[in-house]
Amino acid sequence: MAKKESKNIPESKNNTSILKTSRAQKFVFGVFLILVALVLFLSFLSYYVSGINDQSQVEAIANRSVQVENWLGKTGAWLANFFLYKGFGIASFIFVKIIFMIGAYLVVDLPLAKLKKSIFWDLFLVLNLSLLLGLLWDVIPHLSGIVGYEIHSFIADYTGIVGTIFVLIFNLTIFLIYKIKMSPDKVKDFLEKKNQSIEDELIVGEDNITQVPIAETKKIEEEVPAEAMSSVSHKPVVEETDDDDSWQDMKVIQRPDTTSFEVNKEALKPTIQHASEIQIPKEIPLEPIVKEPQIIPTEDASFVIEKPEEEDIVEESLAQKLVQDFGEFDPTLELSNYKFPSIELLKEYSGSGITINQNELEENKNRIVDTLRNYKIDIAQIKATVGPTVTLYEIVPEAGIRISKIKSLEDDIALSLAALGIRIIAPIPGKGTIGIEVPNANPSMVSMKGVIASPKFQQAEMELPIALGKTISNETFVVDLAKMPHLLMAGATGQGKSVGLNAVLTSILYKKHPAEVKFVLVDPKKVELTLFNKIERHYLAKLPDASDAIITDNAKVINTLNSLCVEMDNRYNLLKDASVRNIKEYNEKFKNRRLNPENGHRFLPYIVLVVDEFADLIMTAGKEVETPIARLAQLARAIGIHLIIATQRPSVNVITGIIKANFPARIAFRVTSKIDSRTILDSQGADQLIGRGDLLYTQGNDLVRVQCAFVDTPEVERICEFIGSQKAYPNAYLLPEYIGEEGNGINLDIDISERDSLFRDAAEVVVTAQQGSASLIQRKLKLGYNRAGRLIDQLEAAGIVGPFEGSKARAVLISDLVALEHFLNNEQK
């Protein structure tokens, strides 16, 4: 029975634009709510002024001849009757406040979350106020409304009027404690302060507190011994000077008794029983010195209390205030009207649905069972899972059967089935079964449209989601490039690498805004990625002096890779200054306005480097390409630079150990030998694929067989035209300028100070061999062709070798090394 095809998902749109209401819509709706609140307020107010007479006219609201006294006519009379008489009575005025506050918050664009608690307590107050006025229905029947009266009647039927009063008291207690924040401790402190103020007034009025001149104070201090002064039990005397701005001029002294002078031992004991007993005379100024502790005088001169200064409480940081005033930083604001490509731009293929051939499944099952039975291997159970191009047969062998014996029969099973690409998985990871993958006689097409429209891709919570295709169980296979963090693709010619690259780029175009991701495209073939030229000012990145964003000349690849290394170092410096570990944390901090752009901080988009043919770069540039690639692969994952490298020659001199160590995520299309399969995946299996997009994916653990989604050239062209026709940035994203060791410019061959660091070595090689050619320098010094060619040009400008003579080697104008040394020394003078 054929599986039903999924319905087309409607046009893809920016997720953020769907979820967020525009500022204009909020403002309009807020003004509407404010006007509604004013209408309700005037209707309610008119009801209590003159509108009670309209109650009998409300039912005839459709009759135009009926006249009402409400200020807002029949509509106001109906609203007042509904809310005040039939509703909550005078408590309905609180609804006016709620609606008005919501409208005001929308107008000034404040978050409504702050109103949640206020609205809750307002509704709580509506119910309790209506219930309270329901008790007075017999006295004033128009204040509570029918709802308040019915609530009162219901509670009074079970608890009586006294019980209703208890309910109101309990609700009032809840309101005071949780809303007003009134607590028993606060009430106690308030009473203590009142008591203290009364005691202070009494103390000020006592006659025994006198002021003594300074001269008399000194005289008393001289006449009375210090031991006696500490034991006198009279009240302290407080002295003031003319300056009332410091505590230093205040002296606390004791006036001795003139009649008897005895040591009072009781006076030496602490007399303060409570904090309220600490008294501050009112004649003394209470302005403390800034940032110094206050000294509180007590009755005992030897007991001093210092009151520490309370620190200012910062209610919110600058970043929080900026977010509250202006909102979070939106990197998509410059292209706020950007529309994502529609799914309708992709083609729907007729043969995309899976067709299950029951006869084919039965025949293959019987052949597998018969083949294994010929080798005395019995099967306890067998199950088939049909995929787009391959059917997985899961078998459970009888007890005592060795798995290695079944694995060795791979070729025999392929012979019996007469099929190409039989692959045995023994055992299937996570299952107690053995898998046999058999290609379908009529494979189905996996379209890019069906993969992009799948809920698994549309709802993917990933930084850089990639929809590769569908697995054997017909599930959409979606992975995150940001977690790979780099991807290595390999396979023989014509097996689907370029289509796979297009699928990867198309997936990102359908999910990420131009402000969030940039591509650096390297296309030595010159024809595979040129379609993306139309989105240069939206998605592509290039060097400042580059004419084309897509790099097709191998000579420019080295500068681009080194420029990415410079960008990587710059980004790591930004992460260091921001005290974060990766680009996600950095951008989140920047959006929350916690990083200052004046300090060089900026929003960092992801950068995806795509190389369509890596083997060609290794052959022409060698170490000059491998070194920056290795640096980027090792370090760039944390700062959002991710590499996708494809090659059709997966040999060990192209995919070296350094490359493999930093590319845990790998995709292998069909290759011709087991050696190539092991080079890519570290295991065999890629040589048993059937081609045409059939691939194996691994991220360092298990292998997953996927049928790559097919996206044709016209589809990519339509997508790029749709994006390119929209408003774009003024220029492509510019990478940092890079100047290599050999320099850059016309004067390089003439200026001695800007010569290549290997100029002398190259001159010695040429003079020793008496043959001037770039290939000789390339072999002897182990350089790339481009750098060797520049060295030849510098040697020509210096006069060491002759001009270019076609296929012949250049003439060497210096006879030996001694003459060369003499020539170079004279040149430096």
Image (cartoon, rainbow, N blue to C red):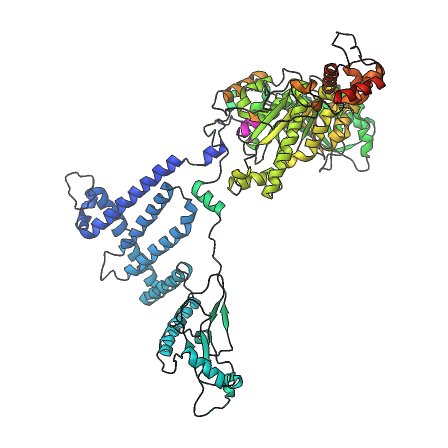
User: Is residue 404 something that shows in the picture?
Assistant: yes
Q: Which x, y percent locates residue 713?
A: 58, 16
Horizontal relation, residue 482 to residue 315: left or right: right
**Residue 451 appears in view:** no
Q: Nearer the viewer, residue 524 or 424?
A: 524
Q: Is residue 648 left or right of residue 279?
A: right
Image quarter in which the C terminus is found: top right
The tally of labels here is 0
Quadrant assignment, res 107: top left
Looking at this view, is 748 or 508 the one in front? 748
Q: Quadrant of residue 131?
A: bottom left
- Residue lying farthest to the front in this orientation: 829
Along the line of sight, which residue is nearer the eye, 793 or 131? 793
- Measuring from the top left, give residue 114's x and y in whole percent: 42, 48
Query: Horizontal placement of 806 versus 142: left or right?
Result: right
The one nearer the camera, 615 or 740, is 740
Corner quadrant of residue 642: top right
In the displayed structure, does residue 49 sit left or right of residue 406? left
In the image, residue 805 sits, relative to residue 827, either above or below, namely: above
Name the residue at 70% across, 24% down: 753
Is 302 rendered above or below residue 389?
below
Image spot of residue 509 (x, y percent): 55, 26
Q: What is the magenta range?
A: 508-516
Q: In the rendered view of the protein, which quadrant contains the N terminus?
A: top right
